[in-house]
Amino acid sequence: MPSEGSTLDDLDKNILKILTKNCMTPFVRISRKLHVTEGTIRYRVRRLQKRGILREFRAIVDPVHLGLGTAAFIAVTVMPQLIPHVAATLANVENVLGVYETHTYGDLLLMVRTSTPSELSDFISAKIKTVEGVTGSQVVPVLKVWKDKL
């Protein structure tokens, strides 16, 4: 069995693989599939949560059905000393699905969804460009989604 700081063993990896496919899978079904007790699965899942490896259980909903059919990646250029502040601020803005530090075509890369291209334009002007430390942005609109697990 791995220690708290070590890598995952095969049982942990298999539990995560099953839960990643369907987080609603009952522990008893996982235990049968992996040939261990349900108590073992409960213990392992709690331990994975405690270690921060299993962060949350959530449903992945098609954003188009929520009225969020317009997606874009936004490369944001930020004053270097304010990157943590800007990243934390933007991470709390509704419609921002992901915030990633990159330093390639800007300092932060955002994944954003809105209902229309016009709303996207307004969103960038009102919610991104107004954040203290933001010095520029480049928008890459998503034309077609082939896979989206965010």
Image (tube, helix red, strand yellow):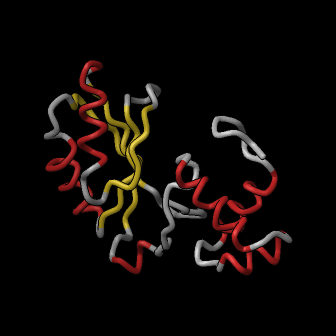
> Measured from the top left, where is residue 147 in percent x and y?
59, 63
Q: Residue furthest top?
A: 81
* Identity of the residue drawn at 28% across and 40% down: 88
* Identity of the residue drawn at 22% across and 44% down: 128
Front-most of 115 and 150? 150
Front-most of 13 and 123? 13
Residue 100 occupies which quadrant of the picture? top left
Position of residue 44 in the picture relative to residue 115 (left or right): right
Front-most of 147 and 60? 60
Q: Is residue 148 above or below residue 59?
A: above
* Identity of the residue drawn at 38% across and 29% down: 106
**Numbered-mark total:** 0
Q: Residue furthest right?
A: 35
Position of residue 18 in the picture relative to residue 116 (left or right): right
* Identity of the residue drawn at 54% across and 55% down: 49
> Measured from the top left, where is residue 101 in percent x and y?
42, 33
Q: Is residue 105 above or below residue 14?
A: above
Q: Is residue 10 above or below residue 117?
A: above
Residue 139 occupies which quadrant of the picture? top left
> Measured from the top left, where is residue 10 in percent x and y?
81, 52
> Measured from the top left, where is residue 120 in percent x and y?
26, 58
